Amino acid sequence: MKQVTVNGKEQAGVATVEAPRAKDNWVLVKVHVAPMCTEYKAFAAGTSYPLWGHEAAGEVVEVAQPSRVKIGDRVVVMPMSACGTCALCLDGDYIHCEDALDFAALHGSMAGLGTMAQYLLKQDWMLLPIPDGMSYAHASMACCGLGPTFGAMQLMDVDRHDTVLITGLGPVGLGGVINGVYRGARVIAVDAIPYRAEKALELGAAAVVNPTEEDALRQILDLTNKGRGVDKAVDCSGVVAAHRLCIDAARRKGQVAFVGECSDDTPLRISSDMIRKGLKLIGSWHFNMADTPRMMRMIGEVGPQLDKLITHKFAIDDIQSAWETQLSGQCGKVLLQPWEGNNV
């Protein structure tokens, strides 16, 4: 099978390796679509990993034992290799599992772990059924296209009474605009890149604010009820300045969810931010598995929006161009198609 490699700084390639085999409750999935996420940062740095990708949608082609899925089933592949037996996994919050399985020890190699390949291995319980009539491309948005902000908005109970701020309009943030609009909320978005700002407006954002402007906070507040702040905010950028913007723009007793990964320290003032303002701060990585039916129903209802979110599709042999497109910032969600022969 073909799988993606990184051969140096901004140098991608494709290697041919032996396809993995189904084992125990690990089934073999033929990858039809692999949405591309933050791996482009490692591509830019030339970081070498054994395998690439954590999102996919495809078809079950081999099972080793009676299973929750069968050959021919169309499925969305959830990220990670959770244990499936701890309290968090059993409660649907598998993404926070602290007992993740050692893939290489279980299978003798890393082949089948990454999604940017023609085949992968995944536990049967981590495969979501794709409804009839739904395309692989649309279904794959249940991963990082819509999943992180969907989970955050579920935790904050976002609804039509809310004004929601979304900072960072990469694919995750743009997915957040879709989630917010679908719930009937009024969405204010934040990004400095014109392409992304225009895309957010196309997806239904009420306004987009450029965070590099000196009065960005005041612009946001002026768009809220009596200038008192947004009801809820979701940061998808992972930028400290955006964290503070969300906290400062939220009204008293508001809520802020952090979705974008960040390794830096964000300043937090306990008295003014937490005690006197009464903010509720939330960390959200993904969505609870129990919300899968609602997620898939939403995907079925927002198809035209997803066609706007997905801006580029590449064959696996064009991985270099795919990652360069992501680096440009002039794109929404980019899809890799491991079985396509040409750029689409």
Image (cartoon, grey):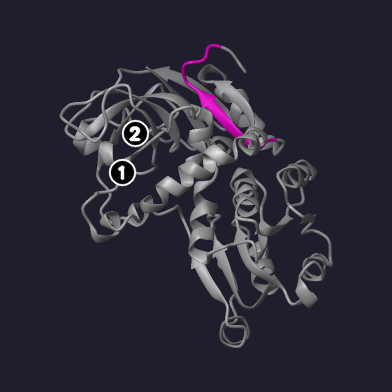
Q: Position of residue 84 (x, y in %)?
A: 24, 49
Extreme-top residue of the structure = 341
Q: Which mark is residue 21?
A: none
> Does residue 37 appear in the picture of this structure?
no
Q: Position of residue 331 (x, y in %)?
A: 68, 35
Task: Name the quarter where the N terminus is drawn.
Answer: top left
Q: Position of residue 314 (x, y in %)?
A: 58, 22
Q: Position of residue 94 (x, y in %)?
A: 33, 53
311 in relation to 240, above or below: above
Near mark 1 (Cα within 10 A), the count class, few <14, some 14-19 or many ≥20, is some
Near mark 2 (Cα within 10 A), the count class, few <14, some 14-19 or many ≥20, is many
179 in relation to 27, above or below: below
The reply to whether the C-beta atoms of the residues labelled 1 and 2 are less than 8 Å apart is: yes
Q: Secondary structure at mark 2?
A: loop
Say if the magenta span includes residue 24: no
Task: Name the quarter where the C terminus is drawn.
Answer: top right
> What are the residue bounds of the magenta stretch?
331-341
The residue lying at 24 percent from left, 33 percent from top is 26
- The residue labelled by disc 1 is 81
Q: Which mark is residue 113?
A: 2
331 in relation to 258, above or below: above
Q: Secondary structure at mark 1?
A: loop
- The amino acid type found where label 1 is placed reads Ser
